[in-house]
Image (cartoon, rainbow, N blue to C red):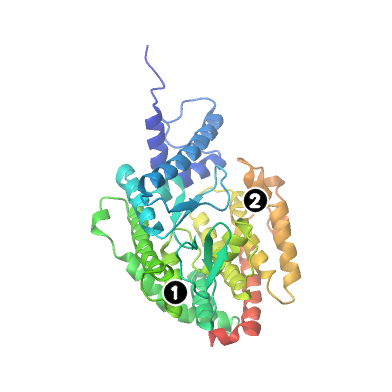
């Protein structure tokens, strides 16, 4: 008798690995064909698909732990993960300890060498070693913000460091917004971007150089490999400054290295300021004494992500508008939540908007196949079935106006 379902787990695993986590997630949520036809037998497709995603979620958690144990040679390195860990969420791991960059790099290269793929594309798993750190053997510097559990973060203490953070924050704003050419409408934002773009171009030029050892991989995989290589390079320099017994500490270079290393990380915030607000305070639930500049950077970076991810979704065909807006809503929540912490007439309305998004829209992100018609998108000015462009544009220009007012009133000296 012929076996019409000759499937092994190894075949299932590798086929889904090749298909990619992001595509698998979107395929399931839009009820399209899941992966290759030979992967799933006829009948009970949705149930089997969900179970496969659940299995792969457990597999990626196990794989990360296995790789970590293999390469954590001195046993002083640990890792932690803030944020959502649901089956359709990305899995962001931050390694902590003096040797964290080396452990991260070994984990990443081992996975690439074995599967001819990257954790980022295959499992939507990102490895980090910056943003927050282990405080063990760290230098006692003014920028050190101590956290519970033997951790620390970086907080700007000088006007130069605040300016560096602002310049990197505005780099998140996509060129398609054309803010640089809106100097009459947004003079302070345009001034910041005019200063930031040339440096950003130099960072991108370094990224364009392709490592000859990675040419056997796809262009997407090559790009991810190169980003990790540059991330590792600058993180190593940062760590030599953060921990005792290494290079001299430099006030100006410290935040430059912190921001540059984050710039090359996969799907990361560029500034320590935004990490402190979103990752540590909001997701990690740490009670921190944060500064206005940190909330300002968080609002700018998340406005950038709100627009950049919308552009990325537009490149996908047949994605429902409800799926796009539900996915983007977390960035809008973070924008208004951060703005609500800054002084001004906007604060109360922004806090109210953030609360509505969190309580009435973001709750649907936990559902595997939400009914988009039931989500009250009217709270953010969107109606299911309509184009998402108008909603994104309205909030973007509203927030740009608020940011321009804040820059003009409170931090003008920093950008002069």
Residue at 59% in and 71% down: 294
Quadrant hosting residue 290: bottom right
Which mark, by number, is residue 264? none
Label 1: few (<14), some or many (≥20) within 10 Å?
some
Quadrant hosting residue 304: bottom right
Eyeballing the image, is 111 above or below 410?
A: above
Query: Can I make out residue 121 in this image?
Result: yes
Give the quadrant of the N terminus. top left
Q: Position of residue 199 (x, y in %)?
A: 41, 77
Residue bearing mark 1? 254
Label 2: few (<14), some or many (≥20) within 10 Å?
few
Q: Position of residue 279 (x, y in %)?
A: 57, 59
Callout count: 2
Give the quadrant of the C terminus. bottom right
Gap between marks 2 and 1 measured at Cα: 48 Å
111 vs 314, nearest the viewer = 111
* Mark 2: secondary structure: loop
Mark positioned earlier in the residue sequence (2 or 1): 1
Query: Can I make out residue 191 in this image?
Result: no
Residue bearing mark 2? 385
Q: Position of residue 99 (x, y in %)?
A: 38, 58
Question: Residue placed farthest to the left in the image?
Answer: 212
Quadrant hosting residue 145: bottom right
**Mark 1 and mark 2 in contact (Cβ < 8 Å)?**
no
Eyeballing the image, is 106 above or below 188?
A: above
* Mark 1: secondary structure: helix
Q: Left or right: where does residue 213 sit relative to residue 67?
A: left
Mark toward the viewer: 2 or 1: 1
Question: Residue placed farthest to the top in the image?
Answer: 1
Residue at 47% in and 58% down: 267
Residue at 45% in and 40% down: 62
């Amino acid at each position: 008798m012929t076996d019409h379902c000759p499937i092994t787990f190894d075949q299932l695993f590798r086929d889904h690995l090749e298909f990619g986590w992001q595509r698998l997630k979107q395929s399931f949520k839009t009820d399209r064909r899941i992966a290759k036809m030979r992967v799933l037998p006829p009948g009970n497709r949705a149930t089997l698909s969900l179970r496969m995603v659940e299995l792969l979620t457990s597999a990626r958690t196990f794989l990360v732990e296995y790789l970590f144990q293999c390469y954590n040679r001195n046993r002083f390195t640990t890792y932690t993960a803030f944020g959502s860990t649901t089956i359709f969420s990305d899995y962001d791991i931050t390694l902590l300890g003096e040797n964290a960059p080396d452990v991260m790099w070994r984990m990443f290269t081992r996975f690439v060498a074995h599967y001819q793929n990257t954790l980022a594309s295959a499992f939507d798993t990102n490895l980090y070693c910056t943003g927050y750190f282990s405080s063990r053997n760290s230098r006692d510097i003014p920028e050190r913000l101590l956290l519970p559990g033997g951790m620390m973060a970086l907080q700007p203490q000088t006007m130069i460091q605040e300016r560096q953070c602002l310049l990197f924050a505005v780099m998140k704003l996509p060129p398609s917004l054309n803010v640089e050419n809106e100097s009459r409408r947004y003079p302070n934002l345009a001034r910041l971007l005019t200063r930031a773009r040339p440096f950003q171009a130099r960072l991108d030029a370094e990224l364009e150089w392709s490592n000859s050892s990675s040419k056997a991989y796809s262009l997407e995989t090559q790009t991810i490999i190169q980003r990790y290589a540059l991330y590792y390079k600058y993180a190593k320099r940062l760590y030599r400054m953060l921990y005792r017994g290494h290079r001299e500490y430099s006030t100006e270079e410290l935040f430059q290295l912190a921001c540059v290393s984050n710039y090359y990380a996969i799907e990361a915030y560029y500034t320590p300021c935004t990490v402190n607000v979103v990752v540590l305070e909001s997701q990690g639930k740490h009670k921190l004494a944060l500064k206005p500049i940190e909330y300002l950077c968080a609002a700018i970076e998340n406005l950038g992500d709100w627009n950049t991810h919308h552009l990325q979704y537009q490149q996908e065909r047949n994605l429902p508008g409800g799926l796009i807006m539900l996915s983007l809503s977390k960035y809008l929540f973070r924008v208004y939540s951060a703005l609500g912490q800054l002084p001004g007439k906007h604060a109360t309305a922004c806090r109210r908007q953030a609360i509505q998004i969190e309580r009435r829209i973001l709750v649907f992100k936990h559902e595997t196949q939400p009914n988009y018609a039931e989500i009250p998108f009217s709270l953010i000015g969107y109606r299911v079935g309509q184009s998402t462009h108008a909603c994104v544009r309205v909030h973007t220009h509203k927030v740009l106006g608020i940011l321009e007012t804040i820059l003009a009133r409170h931090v003008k000296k920093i950008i002069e």
